[in-house]
């Protein structure tokens, strides 16, 4: 399982003349890239952030390896998504020292309000994919800031500054996503994907979303589920379906075949990042970049007009021009 160690100076944040990089920065282990992004962005040089699940890894199927367990044992703080996203994680955490510090960022975001988490289905009491709506995800920032400040109290001031800047960037991203997605014509505001990672897009931006597989990816999609999505495509004349980087594209290919059998030609609208960040060196290697990518792909494929990124997201505009799409 690929791992990445991130010591990142947060993008577009003015860092005060704090003491230089701390020699032995506290180790914080994050499960998903999205949780790791909160830690790395807010922690900056003050924290040694390690992410266990790399690009393309499906967190619903997560099983800790021996080296993951060693990382958890060494970590001064474990940051995970929560709401049951990470497969077998609860069993692993239960086996660790009960004084081990942990933080479930999605659960912290939902508790903080004002935006509430959505109910789940099929074994998930709550839909765990909160990062899809950045205004909601940004509600986790104070909890992460507080947890990191306990580990590196000397860094309180720069971490507060980075946290405030990140929150503003996530809120600017939310407004830009809402404005871009609002340009999709009313008859085409349907997002069809391999699994239900996108419920928060529906909540935040008024898109109708439908996954072939439901919230979990643990079972293979049924023929009935594929047929039912193909019926919807044929009835509503939906122009595009989307593949996801963490899900086998066969699911979506089967939907396209079934729609063709009903005489409707539907295209792959592009590849969306659902439950993992993109490869290092792509725009999607941060949460903000991942959501910019997704919004552009969805808006283009469904007949909308992507609007220019706001000034607050200028670092990502620059990155778009520098890196592979
Ligand atoms: Zn998922």
Image (cartoon, grey):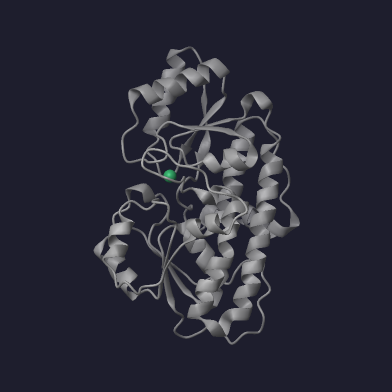
Q: Is residue 297 above or below residue 254?
A: below
Q: Nearer the viewer, residue 93 or 54?
A: 93
Residue 270 in picture, x, y percent from top left: 53, 36
Say whether residue 116 is left or right of residue 128.
right
- The x and y percentages for residue 20 are 57, 85
Side of 92 where 324 appears, left or right: right
> Residue 188 occupies which quadrant of the picture?
top right
Q: Residue furthest top?
A: 263
The image shows residue 56 at horizontal and vertical percentages of 40, 49
The total number of labels drawn is 0
Quarter of image, res 255? top left
Residue 244: % across, % down: 46, 40
User: Ligand 1 lies in which image quarter?
Assistant: top left
Q: Depth check: give the residue in front, 162 or 311.
A: 162
**Residue 286 appears in the rendering:** no
From this view, report whether residue 153 is shown above or below residue 176.
below
Which residue is depicted at the point 42% across and 40% down? 215
**Closer-to-camera residue (324/270):** 270
Quadrant in the picture for the N terminus: bottom left
Relative horizontal placement of residue 313, taking residue 227 as reference (left or right) = right
Residue at point 59%, 52% (across, down): 136
Q: In the rendered image of this protein, does residue 297 appear above or below residue 35? A: above
Residue 52 visible here: yes
**Residue drawn at (55%, 43%) of the image:** 200
């Amino acid at each position: 399982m690929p791992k990445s160690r991130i010591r990142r100076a947060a993008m577009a944040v003015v860092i005060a003349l704090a003491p230089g990089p701390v020699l032995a920065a506290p180790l914080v282990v994050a499960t998903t890239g999205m949780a790791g992004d909160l830690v790395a962005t807010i922690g900056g040089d003050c924290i040694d952030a390690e992410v266990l699940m790399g690009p393309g890894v499906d967190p619903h199927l997560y099983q800790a390896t021996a080296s993951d367990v060693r990382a958890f044992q060494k970590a001064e703080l474990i940051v995970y998504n929560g709401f049951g996203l990470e497969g077998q994680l609860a069993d692993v955490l239960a086996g660790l020292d009960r004084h081990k510090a942990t933080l479930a960022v999605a659960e912290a975001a939902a508790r903080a309000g004002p935006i509430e988490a959505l109910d789940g289905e099929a074994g998930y009491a709550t839909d765990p994919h909160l990062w899809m709506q950045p205004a909601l995800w940004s509600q986790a920032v104070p909890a992460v800031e507080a947890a990191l400040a306990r580990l590196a109290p000397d860094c309180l001031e720069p971490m507060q500054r980075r946290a405030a800047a990140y929150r503003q960037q996530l809120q600017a991203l939310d407004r830009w996503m809402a404005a871009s997605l609002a340009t999709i014509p009313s008859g085409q505001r349907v997002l069809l994907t391999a699994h239900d990672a996108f419920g928060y897009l529906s909540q935040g931006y008024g898109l109708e979303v439908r996954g072939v597989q439901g919230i979990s990816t643990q079972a293979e999609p049924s023929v009935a589920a594929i047929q039912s999505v193909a019926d919807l495509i044929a009835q509503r004349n939906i122009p595009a379906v989307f593949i996801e980087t963490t899900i086998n594209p066969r699911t979506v290919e089967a939907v396209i075949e079934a729609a063709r059998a009903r005489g409707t030609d539907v295209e792959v609208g592009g590849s969306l990042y659902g439950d993992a960040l993109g490869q290092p060196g792509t725009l999607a290697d941060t949460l903000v970049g991942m959501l910019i990518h997704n919004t552009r792909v969805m808006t283009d494929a469904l007949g909308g007009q992507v609007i220019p990124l706001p000034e607050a997201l200028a670092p990502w505009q620059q990155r778009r021009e520098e890196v592979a799409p």
